[in-house]
Amino acid sequence: MAGLAQSFCFTLSDSANLLTLHSQEQLMDLPQLSPVDFYRRQSAAGLEILPDISCLIPENWCFLDYEKMSADGTDAIEIVNWPEFQETLATWDCNSIYIMNPDIIHEMTEKGFLNARKKIRFSRH
């Protein structure tokens, strides 16, 4: 079972191609999957999916094509304004980051983390 003892703080490399999503309008330019294709991929990956589940999926949900985005060079996706997406972006439920390329991760030491926290300035958008 994963726990805090197995967590670590990290930063991203300067060369990382990070896509930060602030608003739903940004979704229109990103590659997407239909709900049927999304669940077909889940099933092909060994996850048990109910047959014809697509009829249960709200029409306004968006399923990003993470495989295509990664192939096109996106290393990570960050959601920074989750309430903007809660009715649209399927499979996300909080502000978070999805790392598709683990090579961009740089683990921080405790000293580096403490120094970084001192530099953080909070702002509202």
Image (cartoon, rainbow, N blue to C red):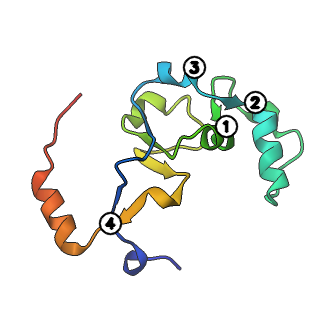
Residue 13 sits above or below residue 113 on the image: above
- Closer to the chain start, of discs 1 and 2, is 2
Q: Badge 4 local density, few (<14 within 10 Å), some, or many (20+)?
A: few
Q: Is residue 62 above or below residue 114?
A: above
- What is the distance, in whole Å, between disc 3 and disc 4 at their CAs? 32 Å
Q: CA distance from mark 1 to mark 2?
A: 9 Å
Q: What's the CA distance linking mark 2 and mark 3?
A: 13 Å
Disc 3 marks which amino acid?
Answer: Met
Q: Is residue 105 left or right of residue 58?
A: left
Residue at the disc numbered 1: 65
What amino acid is labelled 2 in the image? Ser
Which x, y percent locates residue 25? 48, 18
Q: Amino acid at mark 4?
A: Cys
C-beta proximity under 8 Å, tags 1 and 3: no
Give the SS element for disc 2: loop
Q: Nearer the viewer, mark 1 or mark 2?
A: 1
Are the residues tagged 2 and 4 within 8 Å (C-beta)?
no
Residue 66 x/y as whole percent: 63, 42
Q: Which element is circle 4 on?
A: loop
Asked if residue 53 lies left or right of residue 103, the reply is: right
Upstream in sequence: badge 1 or badge 3: 3
State the residue position of label 4: 9
Labels 2 and 4: the sequence-earlier one = 4
Q: Where in the figure is residue 37, as x and y percent of width and height? A: 80, 37
Disc 3 marks which residue? 28
Earlier sequence position, callout 1 versus callout 4: 4
The residue carrying mark 2 is 34
